[in-house]
Amino acid sequence: PSVEAEVQQIYDEAERVARGDVGVMIYGESGTGKEVLARFIHASSPRAQQPLVAINCASLPRDLLEAELFGVERGVATGVEARPGKFEAADSGTLFLDEIGDMAPETQAKILRVLQEGEVFRLGGHTPRPARARVIAATNRPIHKMITDGTFRSDLFHRIATWEVELPPLRRRRGDIPNLAVHMLAREAQNMGLHVRGISRAALKLLQRYRWPGNIRQLKNEISRAVLFLEDGELLDTSRLSAGIRGATEAYGSGSLTAILEAVEREEITAALDAAGGDTQLAAERLKMSRPTLYRRIKSLGIRMPKS
């Protein structure tokens, strides 16, 4: 199936998963829309009227992350007032743990205890409080390899990952880019109170040829930036795209379609190998091809294997 059909299938499955009450693990590069999918699952679930609380596990040092997750009791440190953590804030809703692969093993153990017991203790506290939230986690790290290496707890993984799903990067979703860009443009223009005529074909071609290392998030930022410089009634043309977009497309050159497709495939395989920590079996699974096929493509495209 096409990548566009693959994404539609992901959302179809997500809608069914949402109706259950199972944990979810979402994989994907930064900016691929992991939180968007998490919010879709929450909104499609019986918990939709309850809060969805998100926290990025990579953005805080361990002590601060634990205080944010579990809350703190008054007096745990000088001048500290009591406050609830994310588990309490999520109540009977959904707790989204973004970049869970960056979480310290000690914190992983505490999360596991909360999920097993269904209760949370604030830091410095002795009173158990209900922890009823559904957990959806996401990461851009090779969790299965981390479990093998002992840096991620297998018991926590199995507690959360009843349904696993991987979101493809935007460079594999080129057919989606025009619709995504038009939708983003309409929304941004509405927010700015502008009437715009759409996006020119030439601009759409540039957007489709660009590699989007920052994925959907980068595309959204590009459209948001372009709208800032549009006049009412204007068409978003190539002149309104950033120099980075106009120039970087030259990296693929103006050569044959075969050369461009090979460049895209080379990037895709390299990214999969990096994400899998050099494990060719994991990389092949991510790319949905057999291991022998992956080896043939690596040799054919002259790809250097990363050091594991």
Image (cartoon, grey):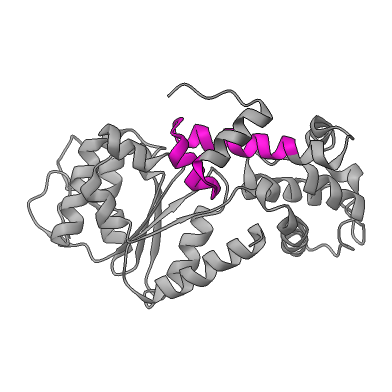
Q: In the rendered view, does 130 fall on the left or right side of 60?
A: left
**232 or 100, which is in the foreground?**
100
Image quadrant holding the C terminus, namely top left
Image quadrant holding the N terminus, namely bottom right
Q: In the rendered view, does 197 fall on the left or right side of 159?
A: right
- In this rendering, is residue 13 above or below 107? below
Residue at 63%, 65% in the rendered image = 5
Residue farthest along the left direction in this orientation: 126
Residue at 31%, 60% in the rendered image = 89
Q: In the rendered view, does 150 fall on the left or right side of 241?
A: left
Residue 209, how many percent across, how many down? 79, 44
Residue 109, how many percent across, how many down? 19, 44
**31 or 250, which is in the foreground?**
250
Magenta includes 266? yes
Magenta includes 35? no
- In this rendering, is residue 190 above or below 155? below
Residue 240, how many percent across, how many down? 87, 45
Part of the protein shown in magenta: 262-291
- In this rendering, is residue 244 above or below 135? above
**84 or 272, which is in the foreground?**
272
Q: Please tell me in which quadrant of the rendered image residue 84 appears.
A: bottom left
Question: In this orientation, does residue 71 appear?
Answer: no
SS assignment for the magenta stretch, majority = helix
Residue 182, how many percent across, how many down? 78, 61
Residue at 46%, 61% in the rendered image = 38
Question: In this orientation, does residue 34 appear?
Answer: yes
Q: Please tell me in which quadrant of the rendered image residue 184 appears.
A: bottom right
Residue at 37%, 42% in the rendered image = 143
Q: In the rendered view, does 56 fall on the left or right side of 31?
A: left
Number of labels in the image equals 0
